[in-house]
Image (cartoon, grey):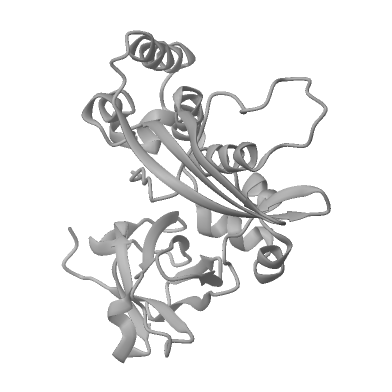
Amino acid sequence: MIAIRRAAFITAAVVLLFPVGCARSPAPEDIAVEYGRAIYRYDAAAIYRLASTADRRAKDEETVRAQVGAPTGFALDIIRHLALFVEAKPVDTRLTGSRATVSLKLTLPDANAPAIRTLAHDWDETALDALSDGERAKILRKLDKLHERRTLPVVEEQETFELVKEGGDWRLILDWGGTIPVQLSASTAKTPALDVTTTPTEIRAKPGESFRVTVRAKNVSGQEITTRVGHGITPEADATFLALLQCPLFLPATFKPGETKEFVSEYLLLKDTPGRVTAFRVTCEFANDDRGF
């Protein structure tokens, strides 16, 4: 199951703000809208392309992709369908030389609203992927009808973006340079029957950002095992600044012989993380659980 998040700056729009076929370069407002759409759609490639040169030096595209995370399968199809219904209206644009500040008024589907969650099977990826083509089409048609009738649940907010002009094109200033490295690993010293990997092995996040980590575990023994997982964060004195938002391994997990499972955990680097914090290390510690479920 996934939790659909909409942090500040998540935006999208139905159309770009400049006329189709126009020869002029995209204005700052256009880039802000395009970036917002990419965030809503979990489009890491577009997010990276729209970032400033300084930001792209600070993070590579793979790091951005891991940090953005994304639902998979039909859940992602639903999100990208919802992105068609989002609107953005420019409120204010201020130009100062090669810099621009853009404010947008946003109206976007509330993916956490009961009406949408019900259609999306509470964002249970396994359940959604098991649907037939006809059942999937029916869900999308129902979303279309909600939008047509103006009953689609939405949220409204105003966001401000900073941009810089580089080589004639506007790019977003995302401050990726002010990031803190988080190293990620797994310990199976107490569960040698499991072969465990984490993806990615390192994330660079700035205060206020969240990120996802995928843990892949395989039972390499010939016996069924049940395991629990603890999350060790160092330095311990600063562990409270790295919050664990979601982890399916809070409950015991049972593996049949040879079985492989994937688990996605979500962390948030708190906005008030002090400047003295220069790095974190997170270790997923697997231990046998003889109690079972």
Residue shown at 50%/23% (left/top)? 84
Residue shown at 60%/73% (left/top)? 177
Residue shown at 48%/15% (left/top)? 133
Q: Is residue 17 left or right of residue 148?
A: right
Q: Nearer the viewer, residue 134 or 87?
A: 87
Residue shown at 37%/90% (left/top)? 235
Where does residue 237 sit, x and y in percent of width and height? 30, 91
Where does residue 174 sit, x and y in percent of width and height? 57, 60
Please say if 120 is above or below 61. Answer: above
Total count of labels: 0
Quarter of the rendering containing residue 144: top left
Say which quadrant the C terminus sits in.
bottom left
Quarter of the rendering containing residue 6: top left
Where does residue 205 sit, x and y in percent of width and height? 50, 69
Please say if 163 is above or below 37. Answer: below
Where does residue 246 sit, x and y in percent of width and height? 31, 58
Q: Nearer the viewer, residue 137 or 249?
A: 137
Say which quadrant the N terminus sits in.
top left
Q: Is residue 235 left or right of residue 279?
A: left
Would you say residue 156 is visible in this rendering?
Answer: yes
Would you say residue 42 is visible in this rendering?
Answer: no
Please say if 235 is above or below 9. Answer: below
Q: Nearer the viewer, residue 16 or 40?
A: 16
Q: Nearer the viewer, residue 241 or 139?
A: 241
Please say if 260 is above or below 18. Answer: below
